[in-house]
Image (cartoon, grey):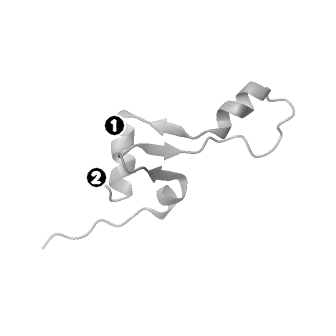
Amino acid sequence: MKRKMKVKKSVSKRFKVTKRGKVIFSHQYKGHLKLHKSKSRLRRQKEPGVLKGRFALKIKKMLAKA
């Protein structure tokens, strides 16, 4: 009998897998000290980023979705 993979709690708080299997994360450095950051940078950080390649696979394994 094969053991079930455990979910890494720290990863589950930071990443999300969509229905189509994309790994989505929210950008860092957007919480405070916004005055010296450009408006375009803050706009870019608002929308979620998408992980690709081997790193996305690693995250899926940690979330037990692979």
Identified by mark 1, the residue type is Arg
**Relative to 30, does residue 17 appear above or below in the rendering?**
below
Q: Quadrant of residue 29?
A: top right
Number of residue marks: 2
Numbered label attached to residue 40: none
- Find numbered disc 1 in the image and state the secondary structure of the residue it sits on: helix
Q: Position of residue 60 (x, y in %)?
A: 36, 51
The crowd level at tag 2 (other Cα within 10 Å; few <14, some 14-19, many 20+) is: few
Q: Position of residue 12 (x, y in %)?
A: 48, 59
**Relative to 63, does residue 46 appear above or below in the rendering?**
above
Residue at the image position 72 percent from the left and 41 percent from the top = 30
Q: Which residue is mark 2?
A: 66
- Sequence-wise first label, 2 or 1: 1
Q: Residue furthest bottom?
A: 1
Identified by mark 2, the residue type is Ala
Q: Position of residue 16 (x, y in %)?
A: 47, 52
Q: Are marks 2 and 1 in contact (CB under 8 Å)?
A: no
Q: Residue furthest left?
A: 1
Is 47 positioned to the left or the right of 12 in the image?
right
Q: Position of residue 53 (x, y in %)?
A: 35, 34
Is 32 positioned to the left or the right of 65 in the image?
right
Numbered label attached to residue 54: 1
Residue at the image position 26 percent from the left and 69 percent from the top = 4
